[in-house]
Amino acid sequence: MDDRRYRQRGYKEHEKERQGKPTEPSLSGAPAAPTTRTVSRCADCGTPLPPLTDSLGQCPKCRSELHSCRQCAYFDPGQHFECTKPVPERISDKGARNACSLFSLHVTVERETTSGSARPVDARRAFDNLFKKK
């Protein structure tokens, strides 16, 4: 009578499934992994910054300062003084150039896009492409 409660649905099902299946899936039919790249973007306009950008310079498009809190990897509006590192004093203007010794330019990892999926020039063509028949 005690063994009946262990036959309930959901009890140790993950162990039952694991017994009959191989531990590692085969990679023969798996799609290729997307390629990625590391890039820094301007916090104000989103323009990709060229590699080896001087962090003491300005954004080539909007001319905002690059050595500022908003461009830093440690910038977090939810933290004390809006920084994840222990800073001694608050910097009031987060977009202005500062002399913080903990500054590190924010770098993200993005997927590479293929050149074959070029965007249509006008909105009408983009709409037509959505509903075209194959």
Image (tube, rainbow, N blue to C red):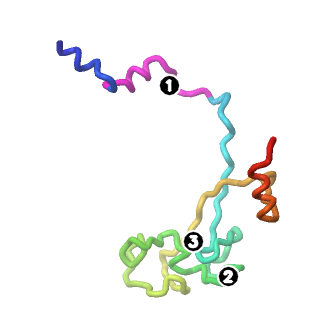
| Secondary structure category for the residue under label 2 | loop
Mark 3 neighbour density, 10 Å: few (under 14) some (14–19) many (20 or more)? many
Residue plotted at (44% across, 87% down): 92
Q: Nearer the viewer, residue 54 or 134?
A: 134
Of tags 2 and 1, the one toward the viewer is 2
Q: Earlier in the sequence, mark 2 or mark 1?
A: 1
Give the extent of the magenta segment: 11-26
Q: Are marks 2 and 1 in contact (CB under 8 Å)?
A: no
* Residue 37 falls in image quadrant: bottom right
Of tags 3 and 2, the one toward the viewer is 2
Q: Nearer the viewer, residue 133 or 17?
A: 133
Q: Amino acid type of disc 1?
A: Thr
Residue 41 image point, x, y percent: 63, 70
Mark 3 highlights which residue?
A: 105
State whether residue 100 is above or below residue 33. below
State whether residue 128 is above or below residue 22. below
Of tags 1 and 3, the one toward the viewer is 1
Residue 13 image point, x, y percent: 37, 24
State whether residue 31 is above or below residue 92. above
The C terminus sits in image quarter? top right
Residue 107 image point, x, y percent: 59, 65
Residue 62 shows which numbered tag? 2
Q: CA distance from mark 2 to mark 1?
A: 52 Å
Q: Amino acid type of disc 3?
A: Leu
| Secondary structure category for the residue under label 1 | loop
Mark 1 highlights which residue?
A: 23
Q: CA distance from mark 3 to mark 2?
A: 17 Å
Q: Amino acid type of disc 2?
A: Cys
Q: Earlier in the sequence, mark 3 or mark 2?
A: 2
Q: Earlier in the sequence, mark 1 or mark 3?
A: 1
